[in-house]
Amino acid sequence: MRPVRRVKRAERLDGLRVGVAQVRPAIGDVAANLRLAARHLRNAARRGAVLVVFPECFLQGYRLGSHPGRVAEPASGPNARAAAGLARLAARHRVAIVAGFIEAEPARPPGGAAARPFNSALVVDRDGRLAGVYRKTHLFGRERDAFTAGADYPVHELYLLDGEPAVRLGVCICYDIEFPEVPRILALRGAELLAVPSADMDPYRAQQASQLVARAIENGFHVALANTVDRRPGAHFFGGSGIADPLGKLVSAGYDRPRLAVAALSAAAIRASGGPEGYLSARRPETYGDLLRSARP
């Protein structure tokens, strides 16, 4: 018989509405992207959403080359203008936010050619409080030359409704979701919901579509993924954002056009799936030693 302790906790998630903003951020224009966020947050609030996820590197726009180090900012403090702007929007609309941004490497001064920032996500509560930061751990291709990889998987506590307990939120960014270990670690640490800011492009739409649903099913929680839409020379960011429940039901934003998709979390789906502890209780970690190998022999 499957344990039900964590499934019972999921009852308080029932009916909470979560949005994914499938948008085209402006490159290097934080003010324009904050205006874009404000427009979608107004829409989300009207539709009853308590949390909205925006794409990878949303605040400054996703572009590699020499761009990331020049526009990086800290997540907090007097120079955190982008983060402060996002916090004001969260408080104004009473909607929590997860949004990608380019975070200045604290050990080095931002703006210099040698500074390799983090590809991060801000987690902001509905009152504008910075609930935490996640730093992308799995860098894809040329990202390894542009960013510093993160090394931890924090679970953030978000207060999404007045007078209600916090929801435990995990975050991973784009390529991270292709590694099942990342959402599984977050589930083991008690995450009840996974947010995924993304800037995924062709030819990887089949991978994104399957992993969005698979990670929800295999961890017994909802997954909300917000991807970029854009066409540039040599790059087609296709969208395909959505919210998947732990039974595999998907509310999709579709492809190739900006859209806000909103879905209600379902305690019934969590119960029917067994919740996070369904699979977690059946694991046999004593047999998983090979997972710690850096590569096949």
Image: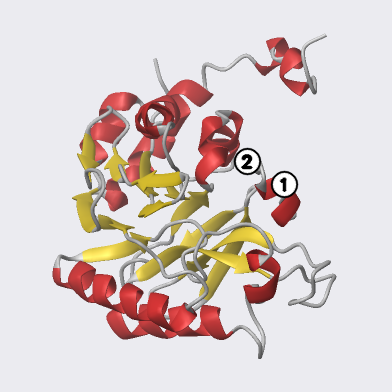
Q: Amino acid at mark 2?
A: Phe
Identify the residue position indicated by label 2 in the image: 140
Camera-nearest residue between 158 and 277: 158
Q: Position of residue 212 (x, y in %)?
A: 38, 34
Residue in the picture at 32% in, 31% down: 246
Residue furthest left as drawn: 47
Q: Tell me the kind of residue under disc 1.
A: Arg
* Residue 179 located left or right of residue 226: right
Q: Quadrant of the N terminus?
A: top left
Q: Are marks 1 and 2 in contact (CB under 8 Å)?
A: yes
- x and y, in percent, of residue 232 in the image: 42, 53
Q: Secondary structure at mark 2?
A: loop
Q: Quadrant of the C terminus?
A: top right
Compared with 125, 205 (above or below) is above
Is 295 on the left-hand or right-hand side of 136?
Answer: right
Left or right of 214 in this view: 245: left
Pick out the residue farthest to the bottom.
78
Which residue is identified by label 1? Answer: 144
State the image quarter where residue 34 is shown.
bottom left
Q: Position of residue 242 (x, y in %)?
A: 29, 44
Say whether residue 68 is visible: yes
Q: Residues within 10 Å of mark 2 (few under 14, many from 20)?
A: few
Q: Residue at x 39, y 80 (%)?
A: 32
| Cα distance between the residues tagged 1 and 2 | 7 Å
* Relative vertical location of residue 186 with respect to residue 136 in this rendering, above or below: above
Depth order, front residue of 113/37: 113
Q: Which mark is residue 45?
A: none
User: Residue at horizontal 55%, vertical 66%?
Assistant: 101
